[in-house]
């Protein structure tokens, strides 16, 4: 299967540290800001950045639902990486 890469950018009226902290807060923030394409959100380990294990289902298309189990790492300052244990999907936040 071919590799698919997507990039997006958003401007948020807050300082970078505040935004990063919100993205890394899987316990209290992330589940509340996900769009309706995500369901069955559950933090299984951790909940704050590095070491978090989080599960959700992603309605990838009208007929395809992806069951995601993501391990979260912070390989460098200001970078959050989510690697899906169930696929080759990787999401990097910077």
Image (cartoon, rainbow, N blue to C red):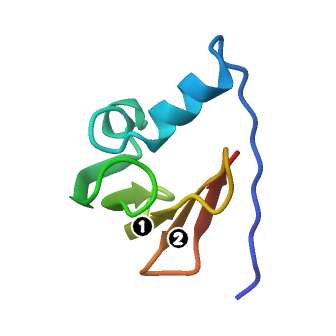
Q: Compared with residue 82, is residue 83 higher up or lower down, i.e. above or below?
A: below
Name the outermost residue toward the bottom.
Answer: 1
Q: Position of residue 51 (x, y in %)?
A: 39, 64
Which residue shows up at 30% across the image and 50% down it? 47
Name the outermost residue toward the top.
Answer: 13
Q: Is residue 81 left or right of residue 8?
A: left
Tell me the crowding category of disc 1: few under 14, some 14 to 19, or many 20 or more residues within 10 angstroms, Cα based.
many
Q: Quadrant of residue 8?
A: top right
Q: Which residue is mark 1?
A: 70
Tell me the crowding category of disc 2: few under 14, some 14 to 19, or many 20 or more residues within 10 angstroms, Cα based.
some
Which residue shows up at 47% across the image and 73% down it? 84
Mark 2 to mark 1 CA distance (whole Å): 5 Å
Which residue shows up at 52% across the image and 70% down it? 83
Q: Position of residue 43 (x, y in %)?
A: 25, 55
Provide the secondary structure element on which disc 1 rests: strand
Q: Which residue is mark 2?
A: 83
**Residue 54 visible in rendering:** yes
Mark found first going from the N terminus, 2 or 1:
1
């Amino acid at each position: 299967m071919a590799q698919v890469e997507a990039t997006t950018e958003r401007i948020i009226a807050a300082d970078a540290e505040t935004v990063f902290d919100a993205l890394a807060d899987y316990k209290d923030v992330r589940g509340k800001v996900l769009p309706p394409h995500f369901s069955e959100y559950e933090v299984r380990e951790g909940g704050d950045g590095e070491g978090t294990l989080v599960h959700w289902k992603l309605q990838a298309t009208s007929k395809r639902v992806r069951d995601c189990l993501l391990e979260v790492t912070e390989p460098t300052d200001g970078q959050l990486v989510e690697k899906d244990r169930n696929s080759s999907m990787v999401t990097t936040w910077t």
